[in-house]
Amino acid sequence: MSSAQQQHPIPESGPVAVRTGPTGGTPRWAASAWARLPVLFVLMLAVGAITNWINGVADGTPLTALVAGVVTGGLALAAYVRLVRYLEGRRAEELAPERARRDLGRGIGAGVALFAVTIALVAMTGSYQVHGWGTFGGALTTLGLMSCAAVTEELAFRGALFRVLEEKSGTWGALVVSGLLFGGLHLLNKDATVWGALAIAVEAGLMLGALYAATRSLWPVIGVHLGWNMAEEGIFGTDVSGSGSHTGGLLHASTSGPQALSGGSFGPEASIFAIMVCAVPTVLFLVLAKRRNRLRTRADVA
C-alpha cells in the first residue's frame, strides 16, 4: 500500500459522518441523509444538463467536441468534490486522485470488452452488419460527448443517489432505486423505449451500482460506463441508449432483426444479450462486495 493510500484509506460501507455546526462548517440540515440526498442529486443532474448543453454546442468539429467533453467532465468532477465538502464536511474519497489513472483505465478496458462480447453475440444472430469503415473524426466526437456523459451520470446516480440512499435503505434498496431511476432517465432520449429503459436499469444500473459497492470508488464505475458507450458508438458504430446522436465511429454499421436480439432503435443495450453479458459481472461484483464486508442491510443503517 502506498503512503497516499495509508493517509486516505478507501472508505468501507459505514455511514458518512457529516460534521455540522460552527466547527464543521456544513449546514445542520445536511446531517440528515433524506435532506442531503435530493439536494446533491438534483444539483448533479443540473450540472449534467448544463454540460450536455455545452457539449451539444461544441460538437461541430471533432477537436472542439473532444476538448469540450474533457473540460466539462473535469468541471463536473470539481463541482461534486466541492458539494461533498460543503454538505458532508469531508474529502470525496470515492474520487481519490491516487486511484484515478489505474481504476479509470481498468474500467474503460472492462467496458469495451463487455460491449465487444455483446455485439459479437448480436452479430452471431445476423442482427449486426458492418458496411465499411467509419471516420476517425466521428470517433473523437463520440469520445468527447461520452466522456462527459459518463462522468455526470455516474456522479449523479452512483456518487449522489446510490451512495447517500444506501445510508438509509441499505445496499439492496439503493441498487433497486438507483437502477430504476437510471433506466427512467433514458426514457427522455429521442428513440427511447420502455423495454430499453428497463434493460438499462437491469444491465447498467445494477452492474454499476454493484461495482461501486465492491470498490467504493467512482473511477472504475466511470471507466466502465465510458468504455461501454465508446465501444457502442465510437468503435462499433451502433446507437447508444436511444439517443439518436449518430456522431459516428470507426465502423459504419447497423443493426436489424427482432428487437429482443438487436435492441431495435434503442441500440444493442436493449438486446437480451446485453442483459445476459452484464449479469455476470454484476453477480461477481456483489460477491466481491460481500467478501469485503461492503454490503449494507437495513439493520446496519437502522
Image (tube, rainbow, N blue to C red):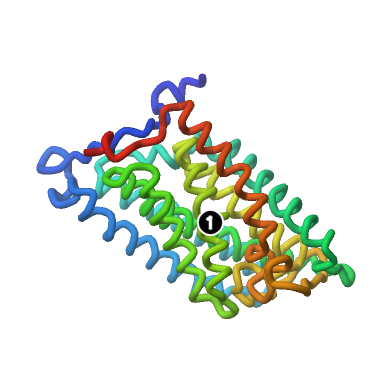
Residue shown at the point (54%, 48%) measured from the top left: 207
Q: How many marks?
A: 1
User: Percent position (x, y) of residue 258?
Assistant: 73, 73
Q: Nearer the viewer, residue 254 or 206?
A: 206
User: Percent position (x, y) of residue 125?
Assistant: 82, 63
Residue ID for mark 1: 202
Residue shown at the point (38%, 32%) measured from the top left: 11
* Snapshot quadrant of residue 44: bottom left
Say which amino acid is labelled 1: Val
User: Percent position (x, y) of residue 130?
Assistant: 86, 68
Direction right: furthest residue: 132
Rendered view: 41 above or below 16: below
Residue shown at the point (34%, 59%) measured from the top left: 41
* Snapshot quadrant of residue 129: bottom right
Residue shown at the point (48%, 59%) measured from the top left: 153
Q: Nearer the viewer, residue 209 or 227?
A: 209
Q: Nearer the viewer, residue 1 or 33?
A: 33
Q: Is residue 149 left or right of residue 65?
A: left
